[in-house]
């Protein structure tokens, strides 16, 4: 027994050292993730749940998917990309900038949102927008920039479907991304706008106005795809799996996203 004690102590010391080393490595492995602005509130909650479960940390940057693609092509050190439009991810994959084609993690929706006190009505058919153009109630209407924001591209499709795109040209206010568009649509910079359903449900936007869903058939589906980029580390890979897990999908659903 006395002869075994030094070996036991040595084993304990080695195990403690290994655990400390692994903990140190996990603390140093803090991936930077690029995420579409539409999932800001959902992903913030997802990241917290992931940390609570694993002890690992993820840092997210939010913006327009198109701008992130440009940054990734220029060498931005992101390890994971959650796009609002799967086309951006598939383009990166085709050029060999990601580990694979990734996965669709959610489907987004558009709403028309108007701030309290606006002369507009939050009408999903956009008939009140049409009437407001005719009677002079509409000054500005906000959408995300269609050139690089998927929700902006879909907003353009919606307005075209309703026959309003040409008529609204001199009244449109373009947000750099859908989060900025939500600010424009609720802060008095516009009488209303087309924004992400997930943002309309959020605790900072929902109290500012009223909204109504736009029919999904009015635009190309917002299939939101994510992918691990070439240099993704262990934490990014574990987080990727967490987003796809039932726990991750439940959080997304709570924020207005349909399952893929």
Image: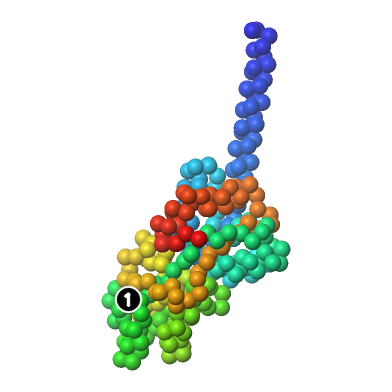
Quarter that holds the N terminus: top right
Residue located at (50% from left, 71% from top): 221
Q: Is residue 95 left or right of residue 118?
A: right
Which residue bears the numbered disc 1?
122
What element does badge 1 sit on?
loop
Residue located at (50% from left, 47% from top): 50
List the single residue furthest toward the bottom. Answer: 134
| Few, some or many residues within 10 Å of mark 1 (<14, 14–19, 20+) | many
Quick one: 31 or 87, which is closer to the camera?
87
List the single residue furthest toward the front. Answer: 217
In the depicted structure, whether residue 15 falls above or below residue 169: above
What is the quadrant of residue 33 in the picture?
Answer: bottom right
Residue 70 placement (x, y as % from top left): 64, 70
Residue 27 placement (x, y as % from top left): 59, 43
Residue located at (34% from left, 84% from top): 127
Q: Is residue 253 left or right of residue 137?
A: right
Quick one: 61 or 66, which is closer to the camera?
66
What is the quadrant of residue 217 in the picture?
Answer: bottom left
In the depicted structure, whether residue 100 falls above or below residue 124: above
Q: Is residue 10 left or right of residue 220?
A: right
List the single residue furthest toward the top. Answer: 2
Q: Is residue 152 something that shows in the picture?
A: no
Q: Is residue 136 left or right of residue 196?
A: left
Quick one: 76 or 217, which is closer to the camera?
217
In the depicted structure, whether residue 115 falls above or below residue 103: below
Q: Is residue 234 something that shows in the picture?
A: yes
């Amino acid at each position: 027994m006395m002869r075994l004690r030094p070996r036991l102590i040595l084993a304990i010391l080695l195990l403690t050292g290994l655990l400390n080393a692994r903990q140190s490595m996990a603390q140093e492995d803090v991936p930077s993730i690029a995420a579409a602005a539409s999932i800001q509130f959902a992903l913030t909650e997802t990241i917290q749940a992931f940390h609570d479960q694993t002890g690992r940390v993820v840092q997210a940057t939010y913006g327009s998917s198109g701008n992130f693609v440009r940054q990734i092509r220029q060498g931005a050190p992101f390890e994971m990309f959650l796009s609002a439009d799967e086309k951006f991810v598939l383009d990166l994959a085709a050029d060999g900038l990601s580990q694979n084609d990734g996965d669709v993690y959610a489907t987004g929706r558009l709403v028309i949102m108007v701030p309290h006190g606006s002369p507009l009505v939050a009408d999903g058919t956009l008939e009140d927008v049409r009437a407001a153009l005719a009677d002079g109630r509409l000054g500005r209407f906000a959408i995300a920039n269609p050139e690089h924001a998927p929700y902006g591209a879909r907003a353009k499709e919606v307005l075209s479907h309703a026959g309003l795109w040409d008529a609204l040209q001199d009244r449109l206010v373009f947000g750099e991304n859908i989060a900025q568009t939500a600010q424009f649509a609720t802060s008095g910079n516009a009488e209303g706008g087309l924004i992400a359903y997930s943002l309309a449900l959020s605790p900072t936007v929902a109290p500012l106005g009223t909204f109504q869903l736009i029919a999904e058939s009015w635009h190309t589906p917002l299939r939101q795809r994510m992918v691990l980029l070439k240099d993704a580390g262990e934490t990014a890979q574990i987080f990727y799996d967490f987003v796809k897990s039932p726990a991750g999908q439940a959080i997304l659903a709570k924020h207005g996203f349909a399952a893929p």
